[in-house]
């Protein structure tokens, strides 16, 4: 091989290796650090879910993740959700599938506030209301502590503890 070709191959290999190291470092930062989890959450809420807000996020995406003061507030004719603390333990395999798999989920202080006047009456009152999620969600172990459903400032339903496995 000529010296020029050998030199080009050498620098190309160094460049590709450096790029791979950079990508592995970025992926590790996103999955295994709290700042990476916060950055991802900020990007997702800014770009896709402006109705979602939260006070703080602790933990990592690859391990245990805790969200404090989670809120979902859509238009006035939709339900509002407030969760004082949400803790989840997702699995890394979820990144490679169309299924969000969570090993453990703990919800403390759930308040679901129903709208005073829904947008419209359902066409079939016997058919339950349902929203189809964009991907399948599987939770292996779920616990709810201190939950309630409200409408017009009045508590319709209250629960102290629910565990589902």
Image (cartoon, helix red, strand yellow):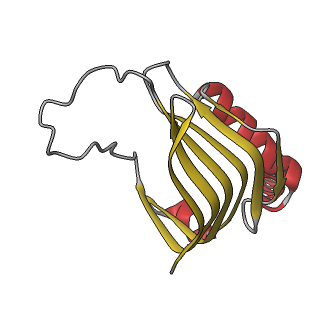
Query: Which of the two residues, 87 or 92, is positioned nearer the viewer here?
Result: 87
Residue 142 vertical placement versus 18 (above, below): below
118 left or right, relative to 56: left
Q: Dividing the image into 4 quarters, which one contains the N terminus?
A: bottom right
Query: Which of the two residues, 68 or 64, is positioned nearer the viewer here?
Result: 68
- Residue 39, visible in the rendered structure: yes
Query: Which of the two residues, 13 or 57, is positioned nearer the viewer here?
Result: 57
What residue lies at 15% left-to-right and 38% top-to-bottom?
A: 125
- State which quadrant residue 17 falls in: bottom right
What residue lies at 76% left-to-right and 51% top-to-bottom?
A: 67
- Residue 3, visible in the rendered structure: no
What residue lies at 53% left-to-right and 25% top-to-bottom?
A: 74
What residue lies at 26% left-to-right and 21% top-to-bottom?
A: 120
Q: Position of residue 42 (x, y in %)?
A: 74, 35
Residue 85 vertical placement versus 106 (above, below): above
Q: Position of residue 58 (x, y in %)?
A: 84, 55
């Amino acid at each position: 091989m000529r010296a020029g070709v050998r030199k080009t191959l050498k620098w190309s290999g160094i460049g590709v290796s450096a790029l791979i190291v950079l990508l592995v470092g970025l992926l590790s930062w996103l999955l295994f650090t709290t700042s990476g989890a916060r950055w991802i959450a900020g990007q997702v809420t800014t770009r896709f879910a402006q109705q979602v807000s939260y006070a703080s996020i602790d933990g990592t995406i690859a391990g245990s993740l805790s969200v404090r003061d989670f809120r979902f507030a859509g238009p006035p004719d939709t339900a509002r959700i407030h969760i004082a603390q949400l803790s989840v333990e997702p699995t890394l395999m979820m990144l490679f599938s169309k299924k969000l798999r969570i090993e453990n989920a703990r919800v403390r202080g759930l308040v679901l506030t129903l709208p005073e006047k829904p947008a419209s009456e359902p066409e079939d009152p016997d058919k339950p209301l349902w929203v189809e999620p964009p991907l399948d969600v599987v939770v292996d172990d779920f616990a709810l502590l201190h939950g309630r459903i409200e409408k017009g400032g009045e508590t319709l339903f209250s629960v102290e503890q629910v565990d589902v496995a």
